[in-house]
Image (tube, rainbow, N blue to C red):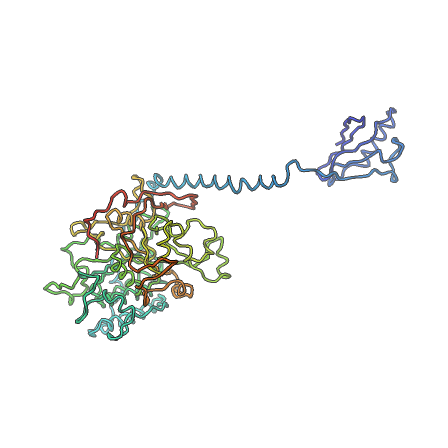
Amino acid sequence: MVQFERLQNGSTSLTIRSRSSFFSPLFVHPKPPSRAKEKKESENAIEEIFRPPPFSSYLSIDISAMSSNPYRRLSATNFPTFSRKKKEPAVPRPLQVAAILIPILVIGPVVLGLAFLANATGTYDTSIQSLKEPFRGIGEEVEGTVEGFPSWVGADSGSVEVTIWNVKSELERRFTDIGVPPSTVSCPAILSGRKDMPTFLESRYSHLFPLEEGDQPSPYISEPQGFYIALNLFNSEAVVGQLFETILTTASLLGPSNVHVSIFENGSRDKTPEAMAHFARALTVAGIAHSLRSDPQPTEWSQVDRIEQLSVFRNVALTSLLNYSSTDPPLFQARPDHNSSSPNPNHPILPTDLIFINDVFVCPSDVLELLHQRRFQEADVTCGLDFVTAPRGAIWGWLAGVMGHNYRFYDNWVTRSIEGYPLRPRFDLFGELRDGMKELFTWDADPLPRLRFEAGLPTQVYSCFDGMAAYSAQPFLPKKVGGNEIRFRNGRLEEGECAQSECTIIAADFWAANRTRWVLVPRIALTYEPDAYSSDWMETRVRRGGAEGMTNELEQEGVFLKERIDWEGVKAPEKVVCWANHKGPRLEMWPFYETSPALSRPPTSSTRRPK
């Protein structure tokens, strides 16, 4: 396109426009002659010679430089000169960069935060009602689906240890036949085999074992002990070999007739139901009361409220405990030869402990340490720690092979410190790269819980579960036998309760019932992979079980600490962080809080502490 424009100095600007914008303005020539014919010929020559190619831009020709004769025709010798005109930006470059970064760094997160906040608050009044009712099947006993153990396994050997050894050998053989992986975790020995030279762990946990002739009464126990062990399983064949062996060993130490094992499984597609059936046969031979049930119907997790469904499954595993009646058969007598026409004063009638275990790799010393600390600390609940391999996920997972093994605390969703905070930040972009132990207890204003945790001492918390928890069984029992009828449940959304984990909600119910002594035991570290349990990382950071001298006073950053918690100085948190359950991804920019139940229902001094 050719365009003329009259300039202030009397010259005429000739613009030849092309498709791109690389070069700058204009052809300029002196005032055209009065002779119209030569003017027309000059203009036609310029337009013909300088017709723009596709890649050109605005071309600037200084026609005054052609010759002293401005009307001379163009030729190869007087070809006009070209020049690029630098285009100055209208806005300085720093401002351009700022204009790009400000929306990304400021406006974007604010908009996202508001969007996710709306999603989070919507959890309290929504869509939960549109979901299906949770699956409430209780399954059927699995023991009858496999043949019994050979008679020699249960032959009267006169020793519980020998019987349990035979049972474990036969169970391992059966697991090998059906393709269930054997236990590969090396657990510390509890018994030395010599009463005159007990191991440290044997001495530490001896008050949990049945009294024998000449034994001293336990300083922590004033009544017969009954231990209710509960599990929920799903596609757990990789872990049941280790898990079932631990339960057998633990039961043999606590006394087979003092233990009841209850397991519920549904929808597994692997060898878990069959392994449970063989385990039920093993428990029968060992004289351990049990209820192992399986239901083939899978759970449609996308169609149900996850927390309500998990609560149902946990309560199914607690059926015998929740519905206990004095008219029912005793929970802790599995074989007829254990019954007696005259009551045994040393035999438990009511359960004293509920040990709930997830599908984790765990050793007998871990279970015994939980039970020991519940008595030593006069606690209502004791928990360990569970860890998963890190780094993982879409952002940092590719570094796993480069960095080596790191592990992170897993059950951050459930656990709250005594000030009501999660143990580690909820959103930490670089959290997968941090040391999994050093990032815990960083939010609390009071340094005492962190100092106790770093010293490996039991630490007071508001709530926990963490792969395994030992509860006082009394709050779960019916009221007619002195219980509180506490159940695992979902949040009461209509009352404004947080829709969080059932294991956090049950902590709120415990606090409301004056069961306020919750203890996290740093010396118990559970994992979801067998190699992780005995890894160097765990061995150097977690001092499992007890250790010589740990009951002495320890110094940590100038503070002298004792193993026993001083409960007089522990106060209930004013507010507790609410980490609500959501369907789909979420990112909450700041935490929600709910008032601590311990403040709405002050504890009464008349409530007797559990033993």
Q: Position of residue 540 (x, y in %)?
A: 41, 65
Query: Would you say 339 lies left or right of 47 here?
Result: left
The residue at 35%/52% (across/down) is: 415
Residue 178 on image: x %, y %: 34, 66
Of the pair 467 and 445, the residue shown nearer to us: 445
Q: Residue 401, how many percent across, how many down?
A: 49, 61
Residue 197 visible in rendering: yes
**Vertical relation: 55 (above or below) 271:** above
Residue 361 falls in image quadrant: bottom left
**Residue 64, placed above or below residue 536:** above
* Side of 117 relative to 476 (left or right): right
On the image, the x and y values in percent for residue 456 come to: 35, 61
- The answer to which image quadrant residue 203 occupies is bottom left
Q: Which quadrant of the rendered structure holds the N terminus?
A: top right
Indicate left or right for 234 with 195 as reference. right
Residue 294 in view: no
**Image quadrant of residue 341?**
bottom left
**Residue visible at 40% across and 54% down in the picture:** 440
Instruction: Determine the residue located farthest toward the front in the rendered image.
Output: 558
**Depth check, front residue: 498 or 599:** 599
Residue at image coords 64%, 37% = 91
